[in-house]
Image (cartoon, rainbow, N blue to C red):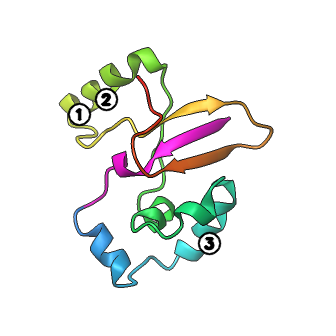
Amino acid sequence: VQAAIDLPNVPLYAGALECVAMGIESSLQPANTRLRRAVANHDEVCGLAAYPLLFDPQTAGGLLATVPRERAEQCVEALRSSGVAPCAAVVGQVVGAAAAGTVELLRVNSRLSL
């Protein structure tokens, strides 16, 4: 599939941006960053402060889930109210089919419509 991720909507841990700014990263970061080849507009967004955090191995695993658009807000509310994922958020949408999965990162919430 092809997906669009709205980078400003991705929840971040407190202090994460500051760590990136100081060059602090996991020892596994370089291996994960190789996955940037799936980011369709890498050259356009790689300079954004939060970009490296998308590849942070400390947040990998269960990071994204897809649900039908009409149930997204209900799902987020259930995750938040249960305490399982208090920072759950709608961060993107599937925008089409692709032979190889790609992701386009958006700088602003410009194309997401629920």
In the picture shown, does residue 106 fall above or below 90? below
Identify the residue at the far front of this view: 110
Mark 2 lies on residue = 76
Mark with earlier residue (1, 3) = 3
**Which residue is found at the position 67% from the left and 54% from the top?**
38
Instruction: Examine the rendering and report whether any part of residue 57 can be seen.
Output: no
Label 2 sits on a secondary structure element that is helix
Label 1 sits on a secondary structure element that is helix
Mark with earlier residue (2, 3) = 3
User: Label 3 amino acid?
Assistant: Ala
Label at residue 31:
3
Numbered disc total: 3
Mark 1 lies on residue = 80
Identify the residue at the far right of this view: 99
Query: Contact (CB < 8 A) between labels 2 and 1?
Result: yes
Report the front residue among 7 and 87. Answer: 7
User: Label 2 amino acid?
Assistant: Val
| Relative horizontal placement of residue 101, taking residue 51 as reference (left or right) | right
Q: Position of residue 57 (x, y in %)?
A: 48, 64
Q: CA distance from mark 2 to mark 1?
A: 6 Å
**Which residue is found at the position 22% from the left and 41% from the top?**
86
The N terminus sits in image quarter? top right
Q: CA distance from mark 1 to mark 3?
A: 31 Å
In the picture shown, does residue 47 fall above or below 66? below
The boundaries of the magenta stretch are 1-13
Asked if residue 10 is among those painted magenta in the image, a careful observer would answer yes
